[in-house]
Image (spheres, grey):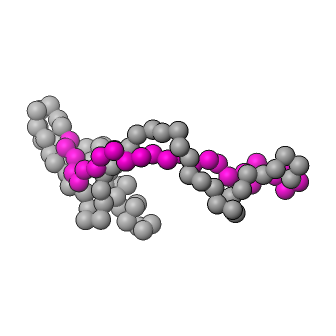
């Protein structure tokens, strides 16, 4: 097996999270509508509950595996996907 280790950008960090049943508390602006509240008729006005995903580990690089040769990083869909997400995250930050 051949590998290629891909580091993350300077400000990025990979995380491992686990599912939980905890939710973020709502702010006063995001209050749940009352049953008799006339403004609550539109579904889009009701904010969705946001679950908390606790971080259980972190990493600063990942390894891509291939059977015959080292992965072609420009063509590998996993590497390409991570690179696109990193570019997107940097553009919106």
Measured as percent of width and height from the top left, residue 89 is found at 40, 61
- Which quarter of the image is occupied by the N terminus? top left
Q: Magenta stretch: give its range.
A: 38-64
Measured as percent of width and height from the top left, residue 58 is found at 28, 50
Q: Is residue 22 above or below residue 45?
A: above
Residue 8 versus residue 81: which sits nearer the camera?
Answer: 8
Magenta segment includes 63: yes
Measured as percent of width and height from the top left, residue 59 is found at 25, 50
Residue at (25% x, 44% y) in the render: 76
Q: Is residue 75 visible?
A: no
Q: Is residue 36 above or below residue 67?
A: below
Residue at (30% x, 56% y) in the render: 13
Q: Is residue 17 above or below residue 87?
A: above
Q: Is residue 68 above or below residue 24?
A: above
Residue at (56% x, 47% y) in the render: 23
Measured as percent of width and height from the top left, residue 3 is found at 13, 41
In the image, 92: left or right of 80?
Answer: right
Q: Quadrant of residue 16?
A: top left
Q: Quadrant of residue 91?
A: bottom left
Magenta segment includes 29: no
């Amino acid at each position: 097996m051949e590998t290629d280790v891909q580091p993350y950008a300077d400000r990025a960090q990979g995380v491992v999270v686990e599912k939980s049943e905890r939710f973020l508390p709502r702010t006063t602006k995001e209050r749940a509508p009352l049953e008799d509240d006339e403004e609550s008729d539109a579904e889009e006005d009701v904010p969705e509950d946001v679950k908390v995903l606790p971080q259980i580990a972190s990493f600063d690089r990942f390894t891509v595996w291939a059977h015959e040769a080292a992965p072609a990083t420009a063509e590998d869909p996993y590497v390409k996907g991570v690179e696109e997400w990193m570019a997107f995250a940097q553009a919106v930050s």
